[in-house]
Amino acid sequence: MRTQQQGNERLAEDVAEPDVEQLHQLHWRNQTKDQETCVVVPLEDALQGPGHVAWKLIQDIKNDSTNNFEFNGEQILVIALQIWPLEQAWRVHVQPQLGTSATVVTLRKLPNDLGLPRVVIIGGGGCGKTTLMQLVVVPTLRTFFERVVLTAPSNRAARGFDPSAKTLHSIAGMTPKDSMRTSSLHIKSDQMRKRMDANQTHAGVHDEALQTSASLLHASALRTTYARQHKYNLEIACYARPNETMGRISFLTLCGDHLQLPPVPKSSGLLAPLDGTSDEHKVGASMFNNMHYLYEMETMKRFQDPTLIAILEKMRRPKGAKLTEQEWQALLDTELDVSQLERDPEAFLQQTVDWFESSYLWSVVSMACYSRAMASAHQNQQTLFFCQAVDFSEQVSKKDFEVYQRMLAVPSVAHTSRLPGMVLQHINMRVRITTLVLPPWAVQDATGTVMEIDVSARDKQRIRSGDTHRAAEMRLEELPPGVYVKLDNCNREFLPPSVCNEHQRIGFSKHCSTCRALEGWVLIQPICSTWTFTDTVTGATLQVSRAQLPLMPAPACPLYSLQGATCDPGLIAHFAMPKRADEDIKWLIVYVLLSRVRGISCLRSIGLTSRIRKIIEGGPPATLADNLKNYFGRRSKTRRQQLRQPRRRSDGIEHPAFSGGDSHPAFACQLSVTACLQRRQFTSRRSNEGRYGSTAQRRFRSCCSGLVVVAPESPPSL
Ligand SMILES: [Zn+2]
């Protein structure tokens, strides 16, 4: 007997081993789904160029009556900034083919080594970077390039970006344990070469760029260059030049948010000071800094609450600004009233069903896991199962229970090989996967719903022998052999479908109401992994092997996992922070917590003290502000002004390049602005700083010193 979701009929217990035909059909269904998810651009539109396609997508979204979403001027500008170089390249590409026997494919698909101007888009949470990428830029790229690869620094970020997105590690054929030193980045084996060839891409978008470590950016750029070296006749020494990044791939955009927690350790981030960092780090940071265009988006669409907008705006203001009494009071009103909570815990649970609960500190997160799981089980009227991790260390006696208890009490899964000490789950619970199970779908921080829990034979016995009432909580004596989780936003089938009696012989039928395809269902089994436990009582360091299910309640999560996400319907924010944290980390903790919700009414705070007020009113810490100034400040400002001023002047005026063609006045005008910008020359500033030791660095230096990147003089005319 499986413990299963009420109302759903049980999975057939003794499903016969799926035959080849059945698996073949499953594979075929998955393939069809992959194709269906593509945005289809009609051929007649595609043959009018990237500008036309992008503009059409923008219009389609505006005219779509099923949502009331529309891109604002800033977002259209950002799209144009990326699409304009593409449009130019396409015209150059099409020109010689006109009148010849060109095919649809040769007309439409652009070459793989154009090295178009690189774009960096920076913007705070909720400015719509990801949306405009998903809805316009990526579909346009897919129309004009054979292969488009989307990347992010972590699996979590990749999931938030696109179902097909990969980690930068996997693109570069590396595991997190591999060395990122220049000398280790050669392509060492045929196997790796094959893998790199398979990753060959024509256009790329990298999300959450500012959570990427500089050495990783460097490593993936250099290794891609090695992989593409022969095919595209690349000069290895120039791999760090802006046009040559990632092996001169045709199109590359980096998106990021500088007001988020940097990667761990923070010294590895792209904005961290360069003093004392490795050569690889310096080159990675300079590659980022030398990108051709940088655009900082300012309009935030996530927030609907003027008070919250005002508070966040003051918080971002350099040197800080005082909150008004009303603003601070509005924040204070979100503070949890403990006496009220004790009097009526039900009310609080009712108000905050499905809310997220987060903190920078793992000790708080593990408490939140418990309270969120309890609330969820209560709400769903399900038994909450406690599954304790099975730890074993050869260095301690099995009877040394106290040591084992201390192991279980380690709150951070970062220390325990990503396996929690206690997993709480019930049927229908929203869960988060804590480590890699089935890439690229069931990866760290992927979320889903528990559908069935397959408990051990012994526990089944205990459940049966229990009285007929549903127990509120139950401790399982053995780890469940498996838990079926239905992943969010995943309609792929990983398990053979459950086939009704009628269709036993011909197999699963899509149109049958009793046959059930298990879309998005994955089987999560206990994972065994070793970790190092440092006993604070005895001071001993122990090697421990732990078996556990890699699951935790989805709504309770560390702050790092919330970055880039909107917390709907709300967030319980713990403002507790490590005493020894740096000023910039403290500021970022407060900023990230406050900027997850759409409005103050969706926020409950814990620990909102006058110290937090001081952090809010103090403005971004000097280190953070200086970094921004050093890296973008002057550039982003001048570029923004350049972008804005001509736009005002040329409003409504069509760009000559468009006057003969279709009239997209708005888009043409945006494009013309971008074109103005392209004539600017950008010199590399930082690349010559510091002394580089290794040969690679000297080579890099010689090819970068005095490097002037010149974009095309003027748009090619048709
Ligand atoms: Zn059927």
Image: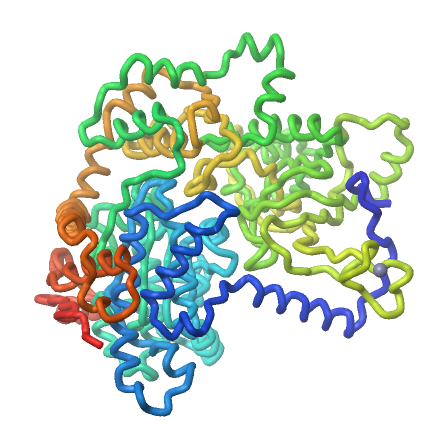
Residue 531: x and y in percent read 55, 46
Q: Which residue is depicted at the point 81% across and 40% down?
A: 7
Q: Is residue 166 left or right of residue 323?
A: right
**Of the pair 529 and 559, the residue shown nearer to us:** 559
For residue 637, above or below residue 623: below
> In which quadrant of the rendered view does residue 467 lie?
top right
Is the N terminus in the top left, top right, bottom left or bottom right quadrant? Answer: top right
**Of the pair 442 and 134, the residue shown nearer to us:** 134
Residue 211: x and y in percent read 36, 48
Residue 396: x and y in percent read 63, 39
Q: Which residue is depicted at the point 36% across and 29% down?
A: 590
Is the C terminus in the top left, top right, bottom left or bottom right quadrant? Answer: bottom left
- Visible in this render: residue 257? yes
Q: Which residue is depicted at the point 88% across and 65% down?
A: 504
Q: Is residue 638 left or right of residue 621?
A: left
Residue that extends furthest to the bottom in the rendered view of this protein: 101
Residue 589: x and y in percent read 37, 32
Q: Colour mode? A: rainbow
**Of the pair 581 and 42, the residue shown nearer to us:** 42
- Visible in this render: residue 286? no
For residue 578, above or below residue 28: above
For residue 143, above or below residue 496: below
Q: Which residue is depicted at the point 20% across and 37% down?
A: 625
Give the number of marks: 0
> In which quadrant of the rendered view does residue 575 lie?
top left
**Of the pair 659 and 309, the residue shown nearer to us:** 659
Q: Is residue 358 left or right of residue 402?
A: left
Image quadrant of ligand 1?
bottom right
Q: Is residue 490 left or right of residue 477?
A: left
> In which quadrant of the rendered view does residue 177 lie?
bottom left
